[in-house]
């Protein structure tokens, strides 16, 4: 039986995981995987002079399920028609959809692939909505995708903590991950979402009680971080901390990092959590901590000027945004588990706070001593669309361009920031390859993603290098997904189904009986009907944490 | 003086003609205008299939005849002038941003209203209707001016964020409901809702300015007594910001 | 239990939007003989699980393959096709039907346009503030029933969600507030009852919101409506977690302003306390259609694919197009018997293809009619509860062809034919 083979010849390879930085080297594909070599008569694609990188990996975006779909529903006026792509004949049905700040599912898959991204995680799915999330991902072609499931404001976990049964959290987390077919645990505003439902709108700090002195944001963070590590999950606890978007929240962010001192933990969209009192940049202090703590990783959540929609499980902050902006507002309190808040928003460079947010995000990137622990994200669609990644890459790579943009933003709140003080750093292509694919893949424990060593999935993006990085990264010449050429000569031509990325940790059966009892007394759906049901894809081979 | 583009309807089949954007006609010749795309269901035709087109390179567009079969005329219009000799259909000037629309006849429902599901209607521009308008004229407007020489249907000035609606005749029920900061000026009768509060009776300085300007520019007959008269001011809607108003003309103080 | 009986536990009932999933079905000799826990509506939904299985094309009984070929060719030849999603479809079938509408460049609409459209539009304009059913059960200390008594169309709502079962955060201490709007009565056992005439409703909602916001309404206590609404406002505002219940199904006095006003009320309450809405809906996976249409097209209803891309046209939905005689072929997917009478009558006047449960018995005179099984009885998959949360559908019986398979086959044929002729 003949094997599907292809040699990409003559490209400049950027594969930071394997220590390759701009070396001209062939990449060999066989049956969807990278192989060390191919016979000389294997078919060849000449990519001489082009940049060859692993497919992009987005570790924090909102692309599927309840909150995202509510955003789509809320914003009919922001949708633009997206025509069905002109695919070659195959087993896929090309689909039209809507573009805009929250594209529809098929269009999301096409757009990510068109940008050279081949792996994407939705960062926030309510456990009870998991089945819906998988259904949307089934309709999101090309990309391999998974999601993080929300814990930390759910009644059962809080009940365990309040009754001194913290040691059962590991089993509980395992059970939720297993039944929902999720990839990682996400905590949003630990305890704060539950407090919002009780009309407590402010979380003062890590020791604010949540219905019981035994339950605090600190305890929730420790418990879930320990659970993720004890289960050797491929990805650490994914943390959206308390007090998002508040001036002075950098203290809480640093306190949260310190609270987990020594534990592997990932802090997400840290840009939104790095403001000093009086709306000043707190990026310096955050990055000092991150640089000094190898067990901590972050993604940035950069703000890009233009339209956005803020969508989060953190309902309280959305109410404030609704009142201050006068924009329409969605709040859904979800099933004693979590929440959902949505407000459309626009970041304007002439607005003082938006300018500060833009500066803080760039500083987080530019002050990072170790790009392996800093992933590129805009927290799509919160800070801006994933389609703005090329523009963000240019800001990181091109200091004159960055300075030009900086000169246009509202200067009121950015005086004294590291960026205004003149960080000269320009990201290299190697570093861009790290923060957009190699690092997120490593932080996710995805052994077959984010690199082009033998055995890796043949998810490959080939760019025609130009003067302007934004142009280079906007339209790859070729994109391969598991060896299938999805983008050909700059046009999307194939749309194979992506695979689901998820983990299946096991939990103790005695514990499950206990949970089932609580469930039968309190839940509104049957224990047996909760979760996602079996998936057609096998669970992900991933490497858990050693620590 | 020609200086305008004339479109004479050939059919009365229901149509949406989004391509009729006066501002974009500044650089177009007659043939180019006549070949602009018009969708009917799944098919696309040309403007010239439905209208006899004369004139070129102007931002002043005149529809010569009845246009009640045309929905969403002037939708999202950004500038220029659209004149409709007859009646207009539904959603005239929907989500309009700038320019002028002048209807010699009546207009249907949803004059200057938002596109479906949006929270904002017209963002700017002027719509002047010599006749009457249907329901929800000026609904959810954020800026701009709607003048109805005749009567307004139910819900005029509904949910206005700001902007002005003038009704020279009577305003039907539910006028100004959920109004935030908008102004509804009514010369005839208006049923002021319970969440409006009577404030005072006075001569709002804005009234003569608006009426004289519109009267002069659009040739709209304006009763002198509306200019010299006094107005009862009701502030509301208190169920919203309460910063809007209904001004009702009264013959005497 | 007798020999030969088979028990299928945790079955989801689509008899109404509550989607109770604690039903245990017993099957004997290929028939459902019992559905434990189901209410009367649920029992009617399941019946004995038997449905007609007729496949007709051009008045003749034909094979399924023939019917699929005929359906595809009739639809592909249409000038202005309509794809109409009736209730009683799994999300999987809804997904396939949207794909087909996309391929056909059809107008796509669903029963939501004839039922919950006002609430969807108001929710898009103002936003949406909702509480899922576990939140209603465990937090709501004040329940405001706005023109609805769930007992009639949602018989188990009270016992499964509220007010009966104790809530973790409220116990059983709940205040029941009934707002009777004309003939639309709230529950009988209310602690407070306020009657409003249909033509007072919009004003009542405006007053209510103004009072909640603390706006000075002046000397208004001479006004009888104001007095009634003041009592209501006072009681509601005492709540720590208020849930406003309403209903999406057509009532005697449907007015667009109700949905708008209720959202405005709940929004205002959240300035000082917490509140959410819970909108009850009828059965057959209606919420699923809204969700599927939204994730595939961007819009929850009335999507026009005529130009090859989705366009939101709630002001020119299926009903208006049918009225204007603009549609030449309608593809009806789902159970036409569950459609509101005006919709059914409109669909009767146009040439159609029908694929769904009991379509052979609906008298639509469809050129092609393919009876299918029912979701959650014959077809496995997913459905959504009235609060948009997903539940599994299990297969209890085998039966007629599955709607999903039929629609996917038609879709594939339409697309292949299109590609061949291109």
Image (spheres, coloured by chain):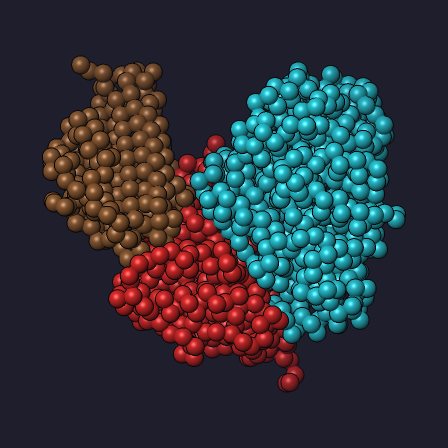
Chain colours: A cyan, B brown, C red
Task: Please determine whether, in this image, residue C347 is positioned above or below residue B231.
Answer: below
The residue shown at (40%, 52%) is C122
Residue A416 seen in the current view: yes
Task: Please determine whether, in this image, residue C232 is positioned above or below residue A452.
Answer: below
Q: Position of residue A269 (x, y in %)?
A: 68, 41
User: The N terminus of chain B lies in which quarter of the figure?
Assistant: top left
Q: Position of residue A17 (x, y in %)?
A: 83, 32
Task: Please determine whether, in this image, residue C188 is positioned above or below residue B138.
Answer: below
Q: Position of residue C372 (x, y in %)?
A: 49, 61
The residue shown at (70%, 63%) is A158
Q: Which of the pair C281/A144 is nearer the observer?
A: C281
**What is the quadrant of residue B103 in the picture?**
top left
Q: Position of C64 compared to A446: left or right?
A: left
Q: Position of residue C149 (x, y in %)?
A: 41, 73
Residue C60 seen in the current view: no
Q: Position of A479 compared to A320: left or right?
A: right
The residue shown at (64%, 76%) is C6
The residue shown at (52%, 36%) is A346
Numbered label tally: 0
Q: Which of the pair A32/C38 is nearer the observer?
A: C38
**What is the quadrant of residue C138 in the picture?**
bottom right
**What is the quadrant of residue C362 in the picture?**
bottom left
């Amino acid at each position: 039986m003949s094997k599907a083979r292809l040699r990409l010849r003559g490209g400049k390879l950027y594969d930071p995981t394997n220590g390759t930085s701009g070396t001209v080297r062939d990449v060999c594909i066989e049956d969807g995987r990278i192989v060390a070599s191919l016979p000389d008569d294997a078919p060849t694609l000449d990519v001489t002079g082009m940049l060859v990188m692993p497919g992009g990996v987005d570790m924090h975006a909102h692309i599927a399920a309840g909150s995202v779909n509510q955003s789509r529903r809320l914003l009919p006026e922001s949708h633009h028609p997206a025509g069905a792509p002109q695919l070659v004949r195959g087993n896929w049905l090309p689909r039209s959809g809507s573009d805009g700040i929250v594209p529809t599912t098929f269009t999301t898959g096409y757009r990510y692939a068109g940008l050279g991204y081949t792996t994407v995680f939705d960062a926030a799915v309510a456990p009870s909505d998991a089945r819906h999330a998988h259904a949307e991902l089934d309709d999101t072609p090309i990309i391999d995708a998974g999601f993080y499931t929300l814990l930390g404001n759910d009644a059962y976990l809080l009940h365990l903590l309040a009754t001194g049964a913290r040691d059962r959290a590991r089993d509980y987390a395992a059970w939720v991950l297993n039944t929902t077919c999720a990839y990682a645990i996400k905590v949003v505003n630990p305890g704060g979402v539950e407090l919002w439902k009780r009309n407590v709108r402010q979380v003062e700090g890590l020791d604010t009680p949540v219905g019981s002195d035994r339950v605090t944001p600190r305890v929730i963070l420790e418990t879930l971080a320990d659970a993720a590590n004890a289960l050797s999950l491929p990805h650490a606890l994914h943390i959206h901390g308390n007090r998002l978007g508040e001036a002075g929240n950098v203290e809480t962010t640093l306190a949260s990092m310190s609270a987990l001192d020594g534990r592997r933990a990932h802090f997400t969209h840290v840009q939104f959590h790095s403001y000093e009192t009086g709306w000043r940049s707190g990026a310096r202090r955050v990055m000092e901590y991150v640089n000094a703590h190898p067990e901590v990783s972050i993604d940035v959540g950069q703000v890009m000027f233009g339209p956005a929609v803020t969508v989060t499980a953190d309902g309280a902050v959305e109410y404030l945004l609704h009142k201050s902006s006068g924009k329409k507002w969605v709040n859904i309190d979800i099933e004693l588990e979590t929440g959902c808040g949505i407000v459309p928003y626009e970041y304007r460079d002439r607005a003082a706070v938006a300018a500060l947010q833009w500066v803080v995000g760039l500083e987080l990137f530019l002050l990072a001593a170790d790009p392996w622990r800093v992933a590129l994200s805009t927290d799509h669609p919160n800070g801006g669309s994933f389609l703005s990644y090329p523009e963000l890459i240019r800001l990181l790579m091109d200091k004159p361009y960055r300075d030009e943009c900086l000169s246009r933003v509202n200067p009121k709140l950015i005086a004294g920031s590291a960026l205004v003080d003149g960080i000269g750093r320009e990201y290299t292509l190697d570093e861009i390859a790290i923060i957009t694919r190699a690092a997120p893949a490593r932080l996710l424990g995805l052994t077959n993603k984010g690199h082009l060593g033998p055995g890796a999935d043949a998810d490959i993006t080939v760019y025609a290098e130009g003067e302007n990085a934004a142009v280079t990264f906007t339209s790859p010449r070729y994109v391969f997904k598991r060896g299938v050429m999805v983008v050909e000569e700059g046009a999307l031509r194939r749309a194979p189904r992506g695979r689901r990325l998820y983990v299946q940790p096991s939990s103790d059966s005695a514990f499950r009986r206990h949970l089932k009892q609580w469930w039968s007394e309190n839940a509104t759906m049957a224990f047996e009907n909760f979760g996602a049901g079996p998936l057609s894809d096998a669970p992900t081979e991933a490497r858990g944490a050693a620590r | 003086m020609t200086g305008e583009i004339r479109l004479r309807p050939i059919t009365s089949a229901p149509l949406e003609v989004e391509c009729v954007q006066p501002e974009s006609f500044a650089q177009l010749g007659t043939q180019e205008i006549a070949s602009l795309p018009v969708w009917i269901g799944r098919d696309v035709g040309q403007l010239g299939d439905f209208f006899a087109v004369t004139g070129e390179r102007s931002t002043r567009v005149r529809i010569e005849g009845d246009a009640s079969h045309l929905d969403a005329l002037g939708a999202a219009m950004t500038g220029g002038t659209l004149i409709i000799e007859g009646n207009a259909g539904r959603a005239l000037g929907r989500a309009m941003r700038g320019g002028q629309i002048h209807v010699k006849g009546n207009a249907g429902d949803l004059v200057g209203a938002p596109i479906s599901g949006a929270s904002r209607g017209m963002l700017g521009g002027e719509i002047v209707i010599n006749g009457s308008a249907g329901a929800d004229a000026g609904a959810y407007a954020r800026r701009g001016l709607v003048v109805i020489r005749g009567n307004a249907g139910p819900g005029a000035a509904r949910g206005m964020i700001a902007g002005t609606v003038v009704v020279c005749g009577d305003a039907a029920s539910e006028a100004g409901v959920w109004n935030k900061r908008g102004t509804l000026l009514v010369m005839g009768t208006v049923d002021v809702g319970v969440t409006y509060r009577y404030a005072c009776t006075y001569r709002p300085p804005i009234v003569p300015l608006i009426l004289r300007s519109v009267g002069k520019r659009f040739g709209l007959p304006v009763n002198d007594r509306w200019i010299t008269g006094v107005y009862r001011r009701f502030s509301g809607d208190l169920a919203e910001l309460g910063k809007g108003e209904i001004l009702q003309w009264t013959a005497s103080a | 239990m007798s020999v030969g009986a088979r028990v299928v536990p945790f079955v989801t009932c689509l008899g109404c939007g509550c989607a109770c999933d604690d039903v245990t079905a017993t099957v004997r000799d290929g028939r459902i003989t019992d559905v434990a826990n189901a209410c009367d509506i649920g029992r009617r939904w399941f019946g004995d699980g038997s449905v007609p299985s007729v496949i007709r094309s051009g008045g003749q009984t034909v094979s399924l393959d023939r019917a699929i070929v005929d359906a595809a060719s009739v639809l592909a030849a249409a000038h202005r096709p309509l794809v109409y999603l009736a209730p009683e479809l799994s999300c999987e079938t809804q997904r396939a039907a949207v794909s087909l509408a996309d391929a056909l460049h059809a107008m796509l609409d669903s029963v939501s346009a004839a039922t919950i459209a006002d609430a969807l539009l108001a929710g898009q304009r103002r936003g949406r503030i909702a509480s899922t059913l576990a939140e209603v059960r465990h937090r709501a200390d004040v329940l405001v029933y706005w023109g609805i008594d769930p007992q009639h169309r949602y018989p188990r709502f009270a016992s499964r969600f509220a007010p009966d079962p104790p809530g973790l955060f409220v116990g059983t201490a709940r205040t029941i507030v009934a707002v009777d709007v004309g003939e639309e009565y709230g529950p009988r056992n209310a602690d407070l009852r306020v009657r409003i005439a249909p033509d007072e409703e919009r004003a009542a909602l405006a007053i209510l919101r103004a009072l909640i916001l603390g706006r000075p309404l002046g000397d208004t206590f001479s006004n009888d409506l104001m007095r009634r609404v003041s009592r209501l406002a006072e009681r509601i505002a005492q709540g720590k977690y208020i849930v406003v219940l309403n209903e999406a199904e057509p009532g005697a006095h449907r007015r667009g302003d109700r949905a708008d006003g209720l959202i405005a009320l709940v929004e205002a309450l959240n300035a000082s306390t917490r509140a959410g809405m819970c909108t009850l809906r009828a059965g057959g996976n209606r919420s699923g259609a809204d969700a599927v249409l939204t994730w595939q097209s961007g819009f929850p209803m009335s999507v026009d694919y005529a130009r090859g891309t989705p366009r939101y046209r709630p002001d020119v939905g299926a009903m208006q197009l049918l009225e204007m005689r603009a549609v030449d072929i309608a593809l009806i997917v789902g159970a036409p018997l569950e459609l509101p009478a005006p919709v059914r009558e409109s669909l009767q006047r146009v040439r159609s293809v029908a694929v769904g449960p009991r379509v052979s018995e609906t008298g639509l005179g469809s050129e092609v009619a393919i009876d299918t099984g029912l979701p959650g009885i014959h077809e496995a998959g997913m459905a959504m509860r009235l609060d948009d949360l997903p539940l599994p559908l299990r297969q209890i019986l085998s039966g007629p062809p599955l709607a999903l398979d039929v629609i996917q086959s038609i879709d594939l044929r339409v697309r292949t034919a299109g590609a061949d002729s291109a």
